[in-house]
Amino acid sequence: EDKVVQSPLSLVVHEGDTVTLNCSYEVTNFRSLLWYKQEKKAPTFLFMLTSSGIEKKSGRLSSILDKKELFSILNITATQTGDSAVYLCAVHENKLVFGAGTILRVKS
Amino acid sequence: DVKVTQSSRYLVKRTGEKVFLECVQDMDHENMFWYRQDPGLGLRLIYFSYDVKMKEKGDIPEGYSVSREKKERFSLILESASTNQTSMYLCASSTRTGGRASGMGDTQYFGPGTRLTVL
């Protein structure tokens, strides 16, 4: 059965810390891996990764995919309270398969 | 600007009631999706549609049906609501990449969600 596992389930950090969120997957027909940020409402798109080893970057957020080891990480540097959210990883084969999410809380 | 809207943010219904959740997108997307989101389980796909009047079951279709009469609108129907359908319901849409056989598009844009409580 296709599976996407995120870790940790939740974490609490202080402003300024760097965090790394993990996503491992087992799917039959991998096309891409997506990261979303979900605050109080709709998930908003962060990154789409299709190739191994190529880092995608947006401000303090970056992400990379390892298709050999079947995982991706999402890094957030110099965290701010506004980074508090649920971070969702999803793998696209013929549909999106979501992980359960990582709850990040950044304390001031 | 990308926009997906859902008819209600919060809804409270009684067991056995028929419930309609509406989703509208203004991006002319071919694909539309209904998910439910529960703590610890992530988003699970209920139904999706890749064209008007077309629908396909997702991972957890039991107890739900859908309707897509117009391209911009995708409705989720709970024929007889039950307490285990209390959840957050999220609608999403995406473009079709390379036709249906290629998959359901990559980036999905989500609506704000409807938190449904069934008493």
Image (cartoon, coloured by chain):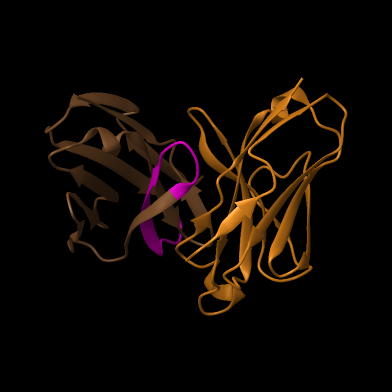
Chain colours: A brown, B orange
Task: Say above or below: B47 vs B114.
Answer: below
Is residue B31 highlighted in magenta? no
Tell me the residue at 42%/51% (across/down). A44
Give how far across and how far down residue A16 sits, in percent.
11, 33
Residue A21: which quarter of the image? top left
Tell me the residue at 62%/55% (across/down). B33
Closer to the camera, A31 or A61? A61
Residue B85: which quarter of the image? top right
Closer to the camera, A8 or A57? A57
Residue B115: which quarter of the image? top right
Tell me the residue at 63%/46% (across/down). B59
Task: Say above or below: B105 vs B89.
Answer: below
Give how far across and how far down residue A11 sits, in percent.
27, 25
A9 relative to A62 in the view: left or right: right
Closer to the camera, B1 or A102? B1
Quick one: which residue is furthest to the top in this view?
B119
Residue A8 appears in the figure: yes
Give how far across and how far down residue A40 sits, in percent.
46, 36
Give how far across and how far down residue A45 sits, in percent.
39, 55
Quick one: which residue is furthest to the bottom in this view?
B98
Quarter of the figure with the C terminus of chain A: top left
Where are the magenta residues, as a range? Answer: A27-43
Task: Say above or below: B51 vs A10.
Answer: below
Residue A27 appears in the figure: no
Is residue A29 highlighted in magenta? yes
